[in-house]
Amino acid sequence: MSRPLEPEEIARQLVDLPGWTGDATAIRRSYDFPDFPTAVRAVDETAVVAEAMDHHPDIDIRWRTLHLALSTHSAGGVTQLDVELAHRIHDIATALGAS
């Protein structure tokens, strides 16, 4: 099991994740996509990555906006897995034209 990151570690790692915020409980970000089908495609692509990592985000979709929260529930907070998944989600969102 991954260990929970300290708040200072999380803050340091979020510097490399534009728009992501968080604390020891979860890291979060919202992305606006050009339209609803693109937002759904982002969810689909994120699902494939998350399943491969066996690490699943909390996702809320509202029209063309995705709200994401990442936390390792079994560790009781944010771990390196969450940071890695956030990078992968950011790459997906950027490739699909999110703002």
Image (spheres, helix red, strand yellow):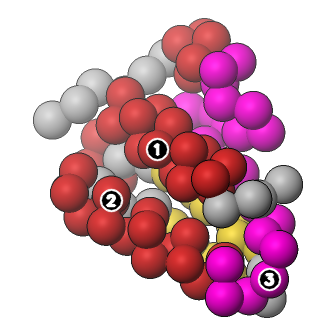
Amino acid at circle 2: Ala
Q: Which residue sits at x=31%, y=67%?
A: 48
For the question of whether residue 76 can be seen, the reply is: no
| Residue at x 37%, y 28% (from the top left corner) | 80
Task: State the CA–CA distance, disc 3 to disc 1.
Answer: 21 Å
- Give the labeled residue for mark 1: 88
Camera-side residue of 84 and 72: 84
The residue beneath circle 2 is 50
Foreground: 82 or 63?
63
Q: Do the residues labelled 2 and 3 touch (CB within 8 Å)?
A: no
Circles 2 and 1 in contact, beta carbons < 8 Å? no
Locate the C terminus and report the quarter of the image it occupies.
Answer: bottom right
Front one among 79 and 65: 65
In the image, is residue 74 above or below residue 10? below
Find residue 1 and report its image quarter.
top left
Q: Which residue is drawn at 51% across and 67% down?
A: 58
Q: From the top left corner, tell me how far across and down residue 24 is, in percent.
A: 56, 32
- Relative to 37, say whether 77 is above or below: above
Say left or right for 71 vs 76. Answer: right
Q: Which residue range is magenta in the image?
A: 14-38
Q: Which label's residue is closer to the chain start, 2 or 3?
A: 3
Is residue 33 covered in magenta? yes
Compared with residue 96, is residue 3 higher up or lower down, i.e. above or below? above
Q: Distance between the residues labelled 2 and 1?
A: 9 Å
**Label 3, on which residue?**
35
User: Residue at 56% across / 44% down in the picture?
Assistant: 91
Instruction: Count residues near mark 3 (Cα–Cα under 10 Å), then give few for <14, some for 14-19, many for 20+.
Output: few
